[in-house]
Amino acid sequence: MLTSYGPILVLIAVVLAFAVGNIIISELFGKKTISIAKGDPYECGSRPVGGARLRLSIHFYLVAVLFILFDVESLLLIPWAVAARGFAGAGVGGVVFAEVLGFVAVLGVGLAYVWRKGGLRWDR
Amino acid sequence: MNDYLVQLGRIAPEAVLTVLALVILTWDLVTKGRDCRRLAYGTLAGLGLVVWLLCGQWASLGETGAVSAFGMVTVDRFGTFFKLFTALALMVVVLLVLFDRRERKHGIGEYYFLLIGAAIGIFFMVSTNNLLLLMLGLELLSLASYSLAGFHKGSQRSAEASLKYIVFGGLSAGIMLYGISLLYGLTGTIDLSVMGRGGEGGYPVGLVAQFAVSPIPVAVAVVLVLAGFAYKASIVPFHFWTPDVYEGAPTPVTTFLAVASKAAGFAALLRFVGALFLVDGVQEAVHAYGARIGLLLAILSAVTMTLGNLSAMRQRSLKRLLAYSSIAHAGYVLMGLAVMTEAGFSASVFYLAAYYFMNLGAFAFLLYFEGETNSDEIDSLKGMGWRHPVVAWAMVAFLVSLAGLPPTVGFYGKLLLFYEGVDAGLGWLVFIAALNSVISLFYYFRVAKALFLTEPVERVPNRQPALTGLIVGLSVLTVVTGIFNSALQRWSGEAPRALGISDQLEEPH
């Protein structure tokens, strides 16, 4: 049984050898020119300005999190909407509808919370 | 439709908690965060209802009875036992938030909301055989705990605690999910009971049969999943977050993490190990396999308790001392698991129940002490025994219980664990545990020494009467359940019976 994992081990070995080997070969035989441009993050294009560790407004993260929340909501609701006729046909339409309402209600409370706490205001 | 309502009735406690969480959050919004006392009373009332529902559930379930709700939740006495203790512990934690002198009382509605959210996670986590739901419950608990640990947004310590917790949590959740995916790949099911017995759906072989064919992948998968539980229960080598998070988090949150969250991790671990390795009516192969996992757990247990106790000795902060002591206690509880019998499991469950009482009390004392002196150093404890004799004597009861001396519940819990350990032939582990108890005596009594062995000073008026009442109540519980332990012993004995594990694994002497 264990031997059936053999190919994976071989694959890992080949991948490692390829990656490490290339670095070693270019280090050994590559031609080296040293200039200031070599130290730049990108050797072509516009020159970088300032450091990379900027402080971003927390609002960006809030909006991103809220987007994901409601994105997931629509991900669940669309399949339900497509299948709703089938549920109704099977006689469980009411129950499933109540469940979906519960789901939306939980999200609604969440939205009310964010709204009230000022999470949707941009100009603070 | 009718059947739907019956199934919904089985998860009534969880449903009530969910509604409670939403009500609390909406209430907080409507009153604009001005009304935190009444929010706490509302939370307590809701939790009281949950406790009442759980008591009804316990009574209606037979000893080994288990009913399923929606094919995901398994309602049995094992789960109900831990849910009951979680709900009661949460009530104490809510009271602690209410009594916390250093906590501002306005605009903290989220505190209660997050605590209830964590409890919902625990409720689902301890009552399911479905690995997916177990993972979801664990994550819900974790997410709520991360935000709770960082609840004091202005405090650097609190933010550090939250960040450390989330990094460790994310790592171990990833490891655990990978293990679960391997288990699914090996057995074709995510249902623990099917995985243990080998069911109709998927491949007709259980995990044990898989083990006979390909031992290494199964062992890797099981160890990876164990990592997730070890993180929740702070078992070595997944304990590193514990002292820092416990120290940085607000004390009521620390209480919740040290008591309810840790016990929930153990409950899920007990169910996992019980369902996979101790099932009824399986053949010899299980025996060898179960014994090997038992040995692994025994080694983890020995390492965990030793490391926890040795580190606790060097602590200067009472909060960190209690954090390391909680690691050591995780080691003791693991002893019962390592025994791999139903009796061992019930010893573990009893010890967890004892742990609820004594640790809730110790942390309540810590909160009292912080409210008085604004510090958690053991040095600033000096003379507390003369200034505040009532709470100090109550603390001595908790320390005696934590150290495992009679007549407290901690002593009886340890006695059961040691007995089962010796009975299963794990004499070396019991020896290490006994040595550890001696070590723990040293640092627990260092606290007692700081309390009393100083120059007598004037007694000061008690400024926290409500908290004092709670502490005294818990200390009475610690002593009384230690002397009259038969009821608790019966209940904790009944709890693991619901897991359907066999008692046939003991070595034929």
Image (cartoon, helix red, strand yellow):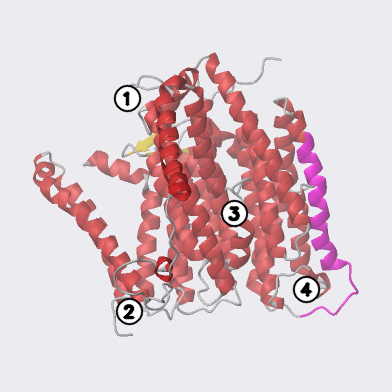
Q: Are discs 3 and 1 located on one and the same chain? A: yes
Numbered badge on residue A118: 2
Q: Earlier in the sequence, mark 4 or mark 1?
A: 1
Residue pointed to by mark 1: B202
Dot 4 lies on which element?
helix
Residue at image point 74% right, 70% down: B377
Dot 3 lies on which element?
helix
> Is residue B358 in sight in this rendering?
no
Closer to the camera: disc 3 or disc 1? 1
Q: Is residue B303 above or below residue B391?
A: above
> In the image, what residue type sits under mark 3?
Val
Question: Residue B280, image x and y in percent?
Answer: 50, 21
Quarter of the image holding residue B23?
bottom left
Q: Please, what is the dominant secondary structure of the magenta stretch?
A: helix
- The stretch in magenta equals B431-460
Dot 2 lies on which element?
loop
Q: Residues within 10 Å of mark 1 (few under 14, many from 20)?
A: some
> In the image, what residue type sits under mark 1?
Gly
Q: Earlier in the sequence, mark 4 or mark 3?
A: 3
Residue pointed to by mark 3: B259
Instruction: Give me the C-alpha separation between circle 2 and circle 3.
Output: 35 Å
Q: Residues within 10 Å of mark 2 (few under 14, many from 20)?
A: few
Does the residue at mark 4 contact the one at mark 1 (Cβ under 8 Å)? no
Instruction: Give me the C-alpha separation between circle 4 and circle 3.
Output: 25 Å
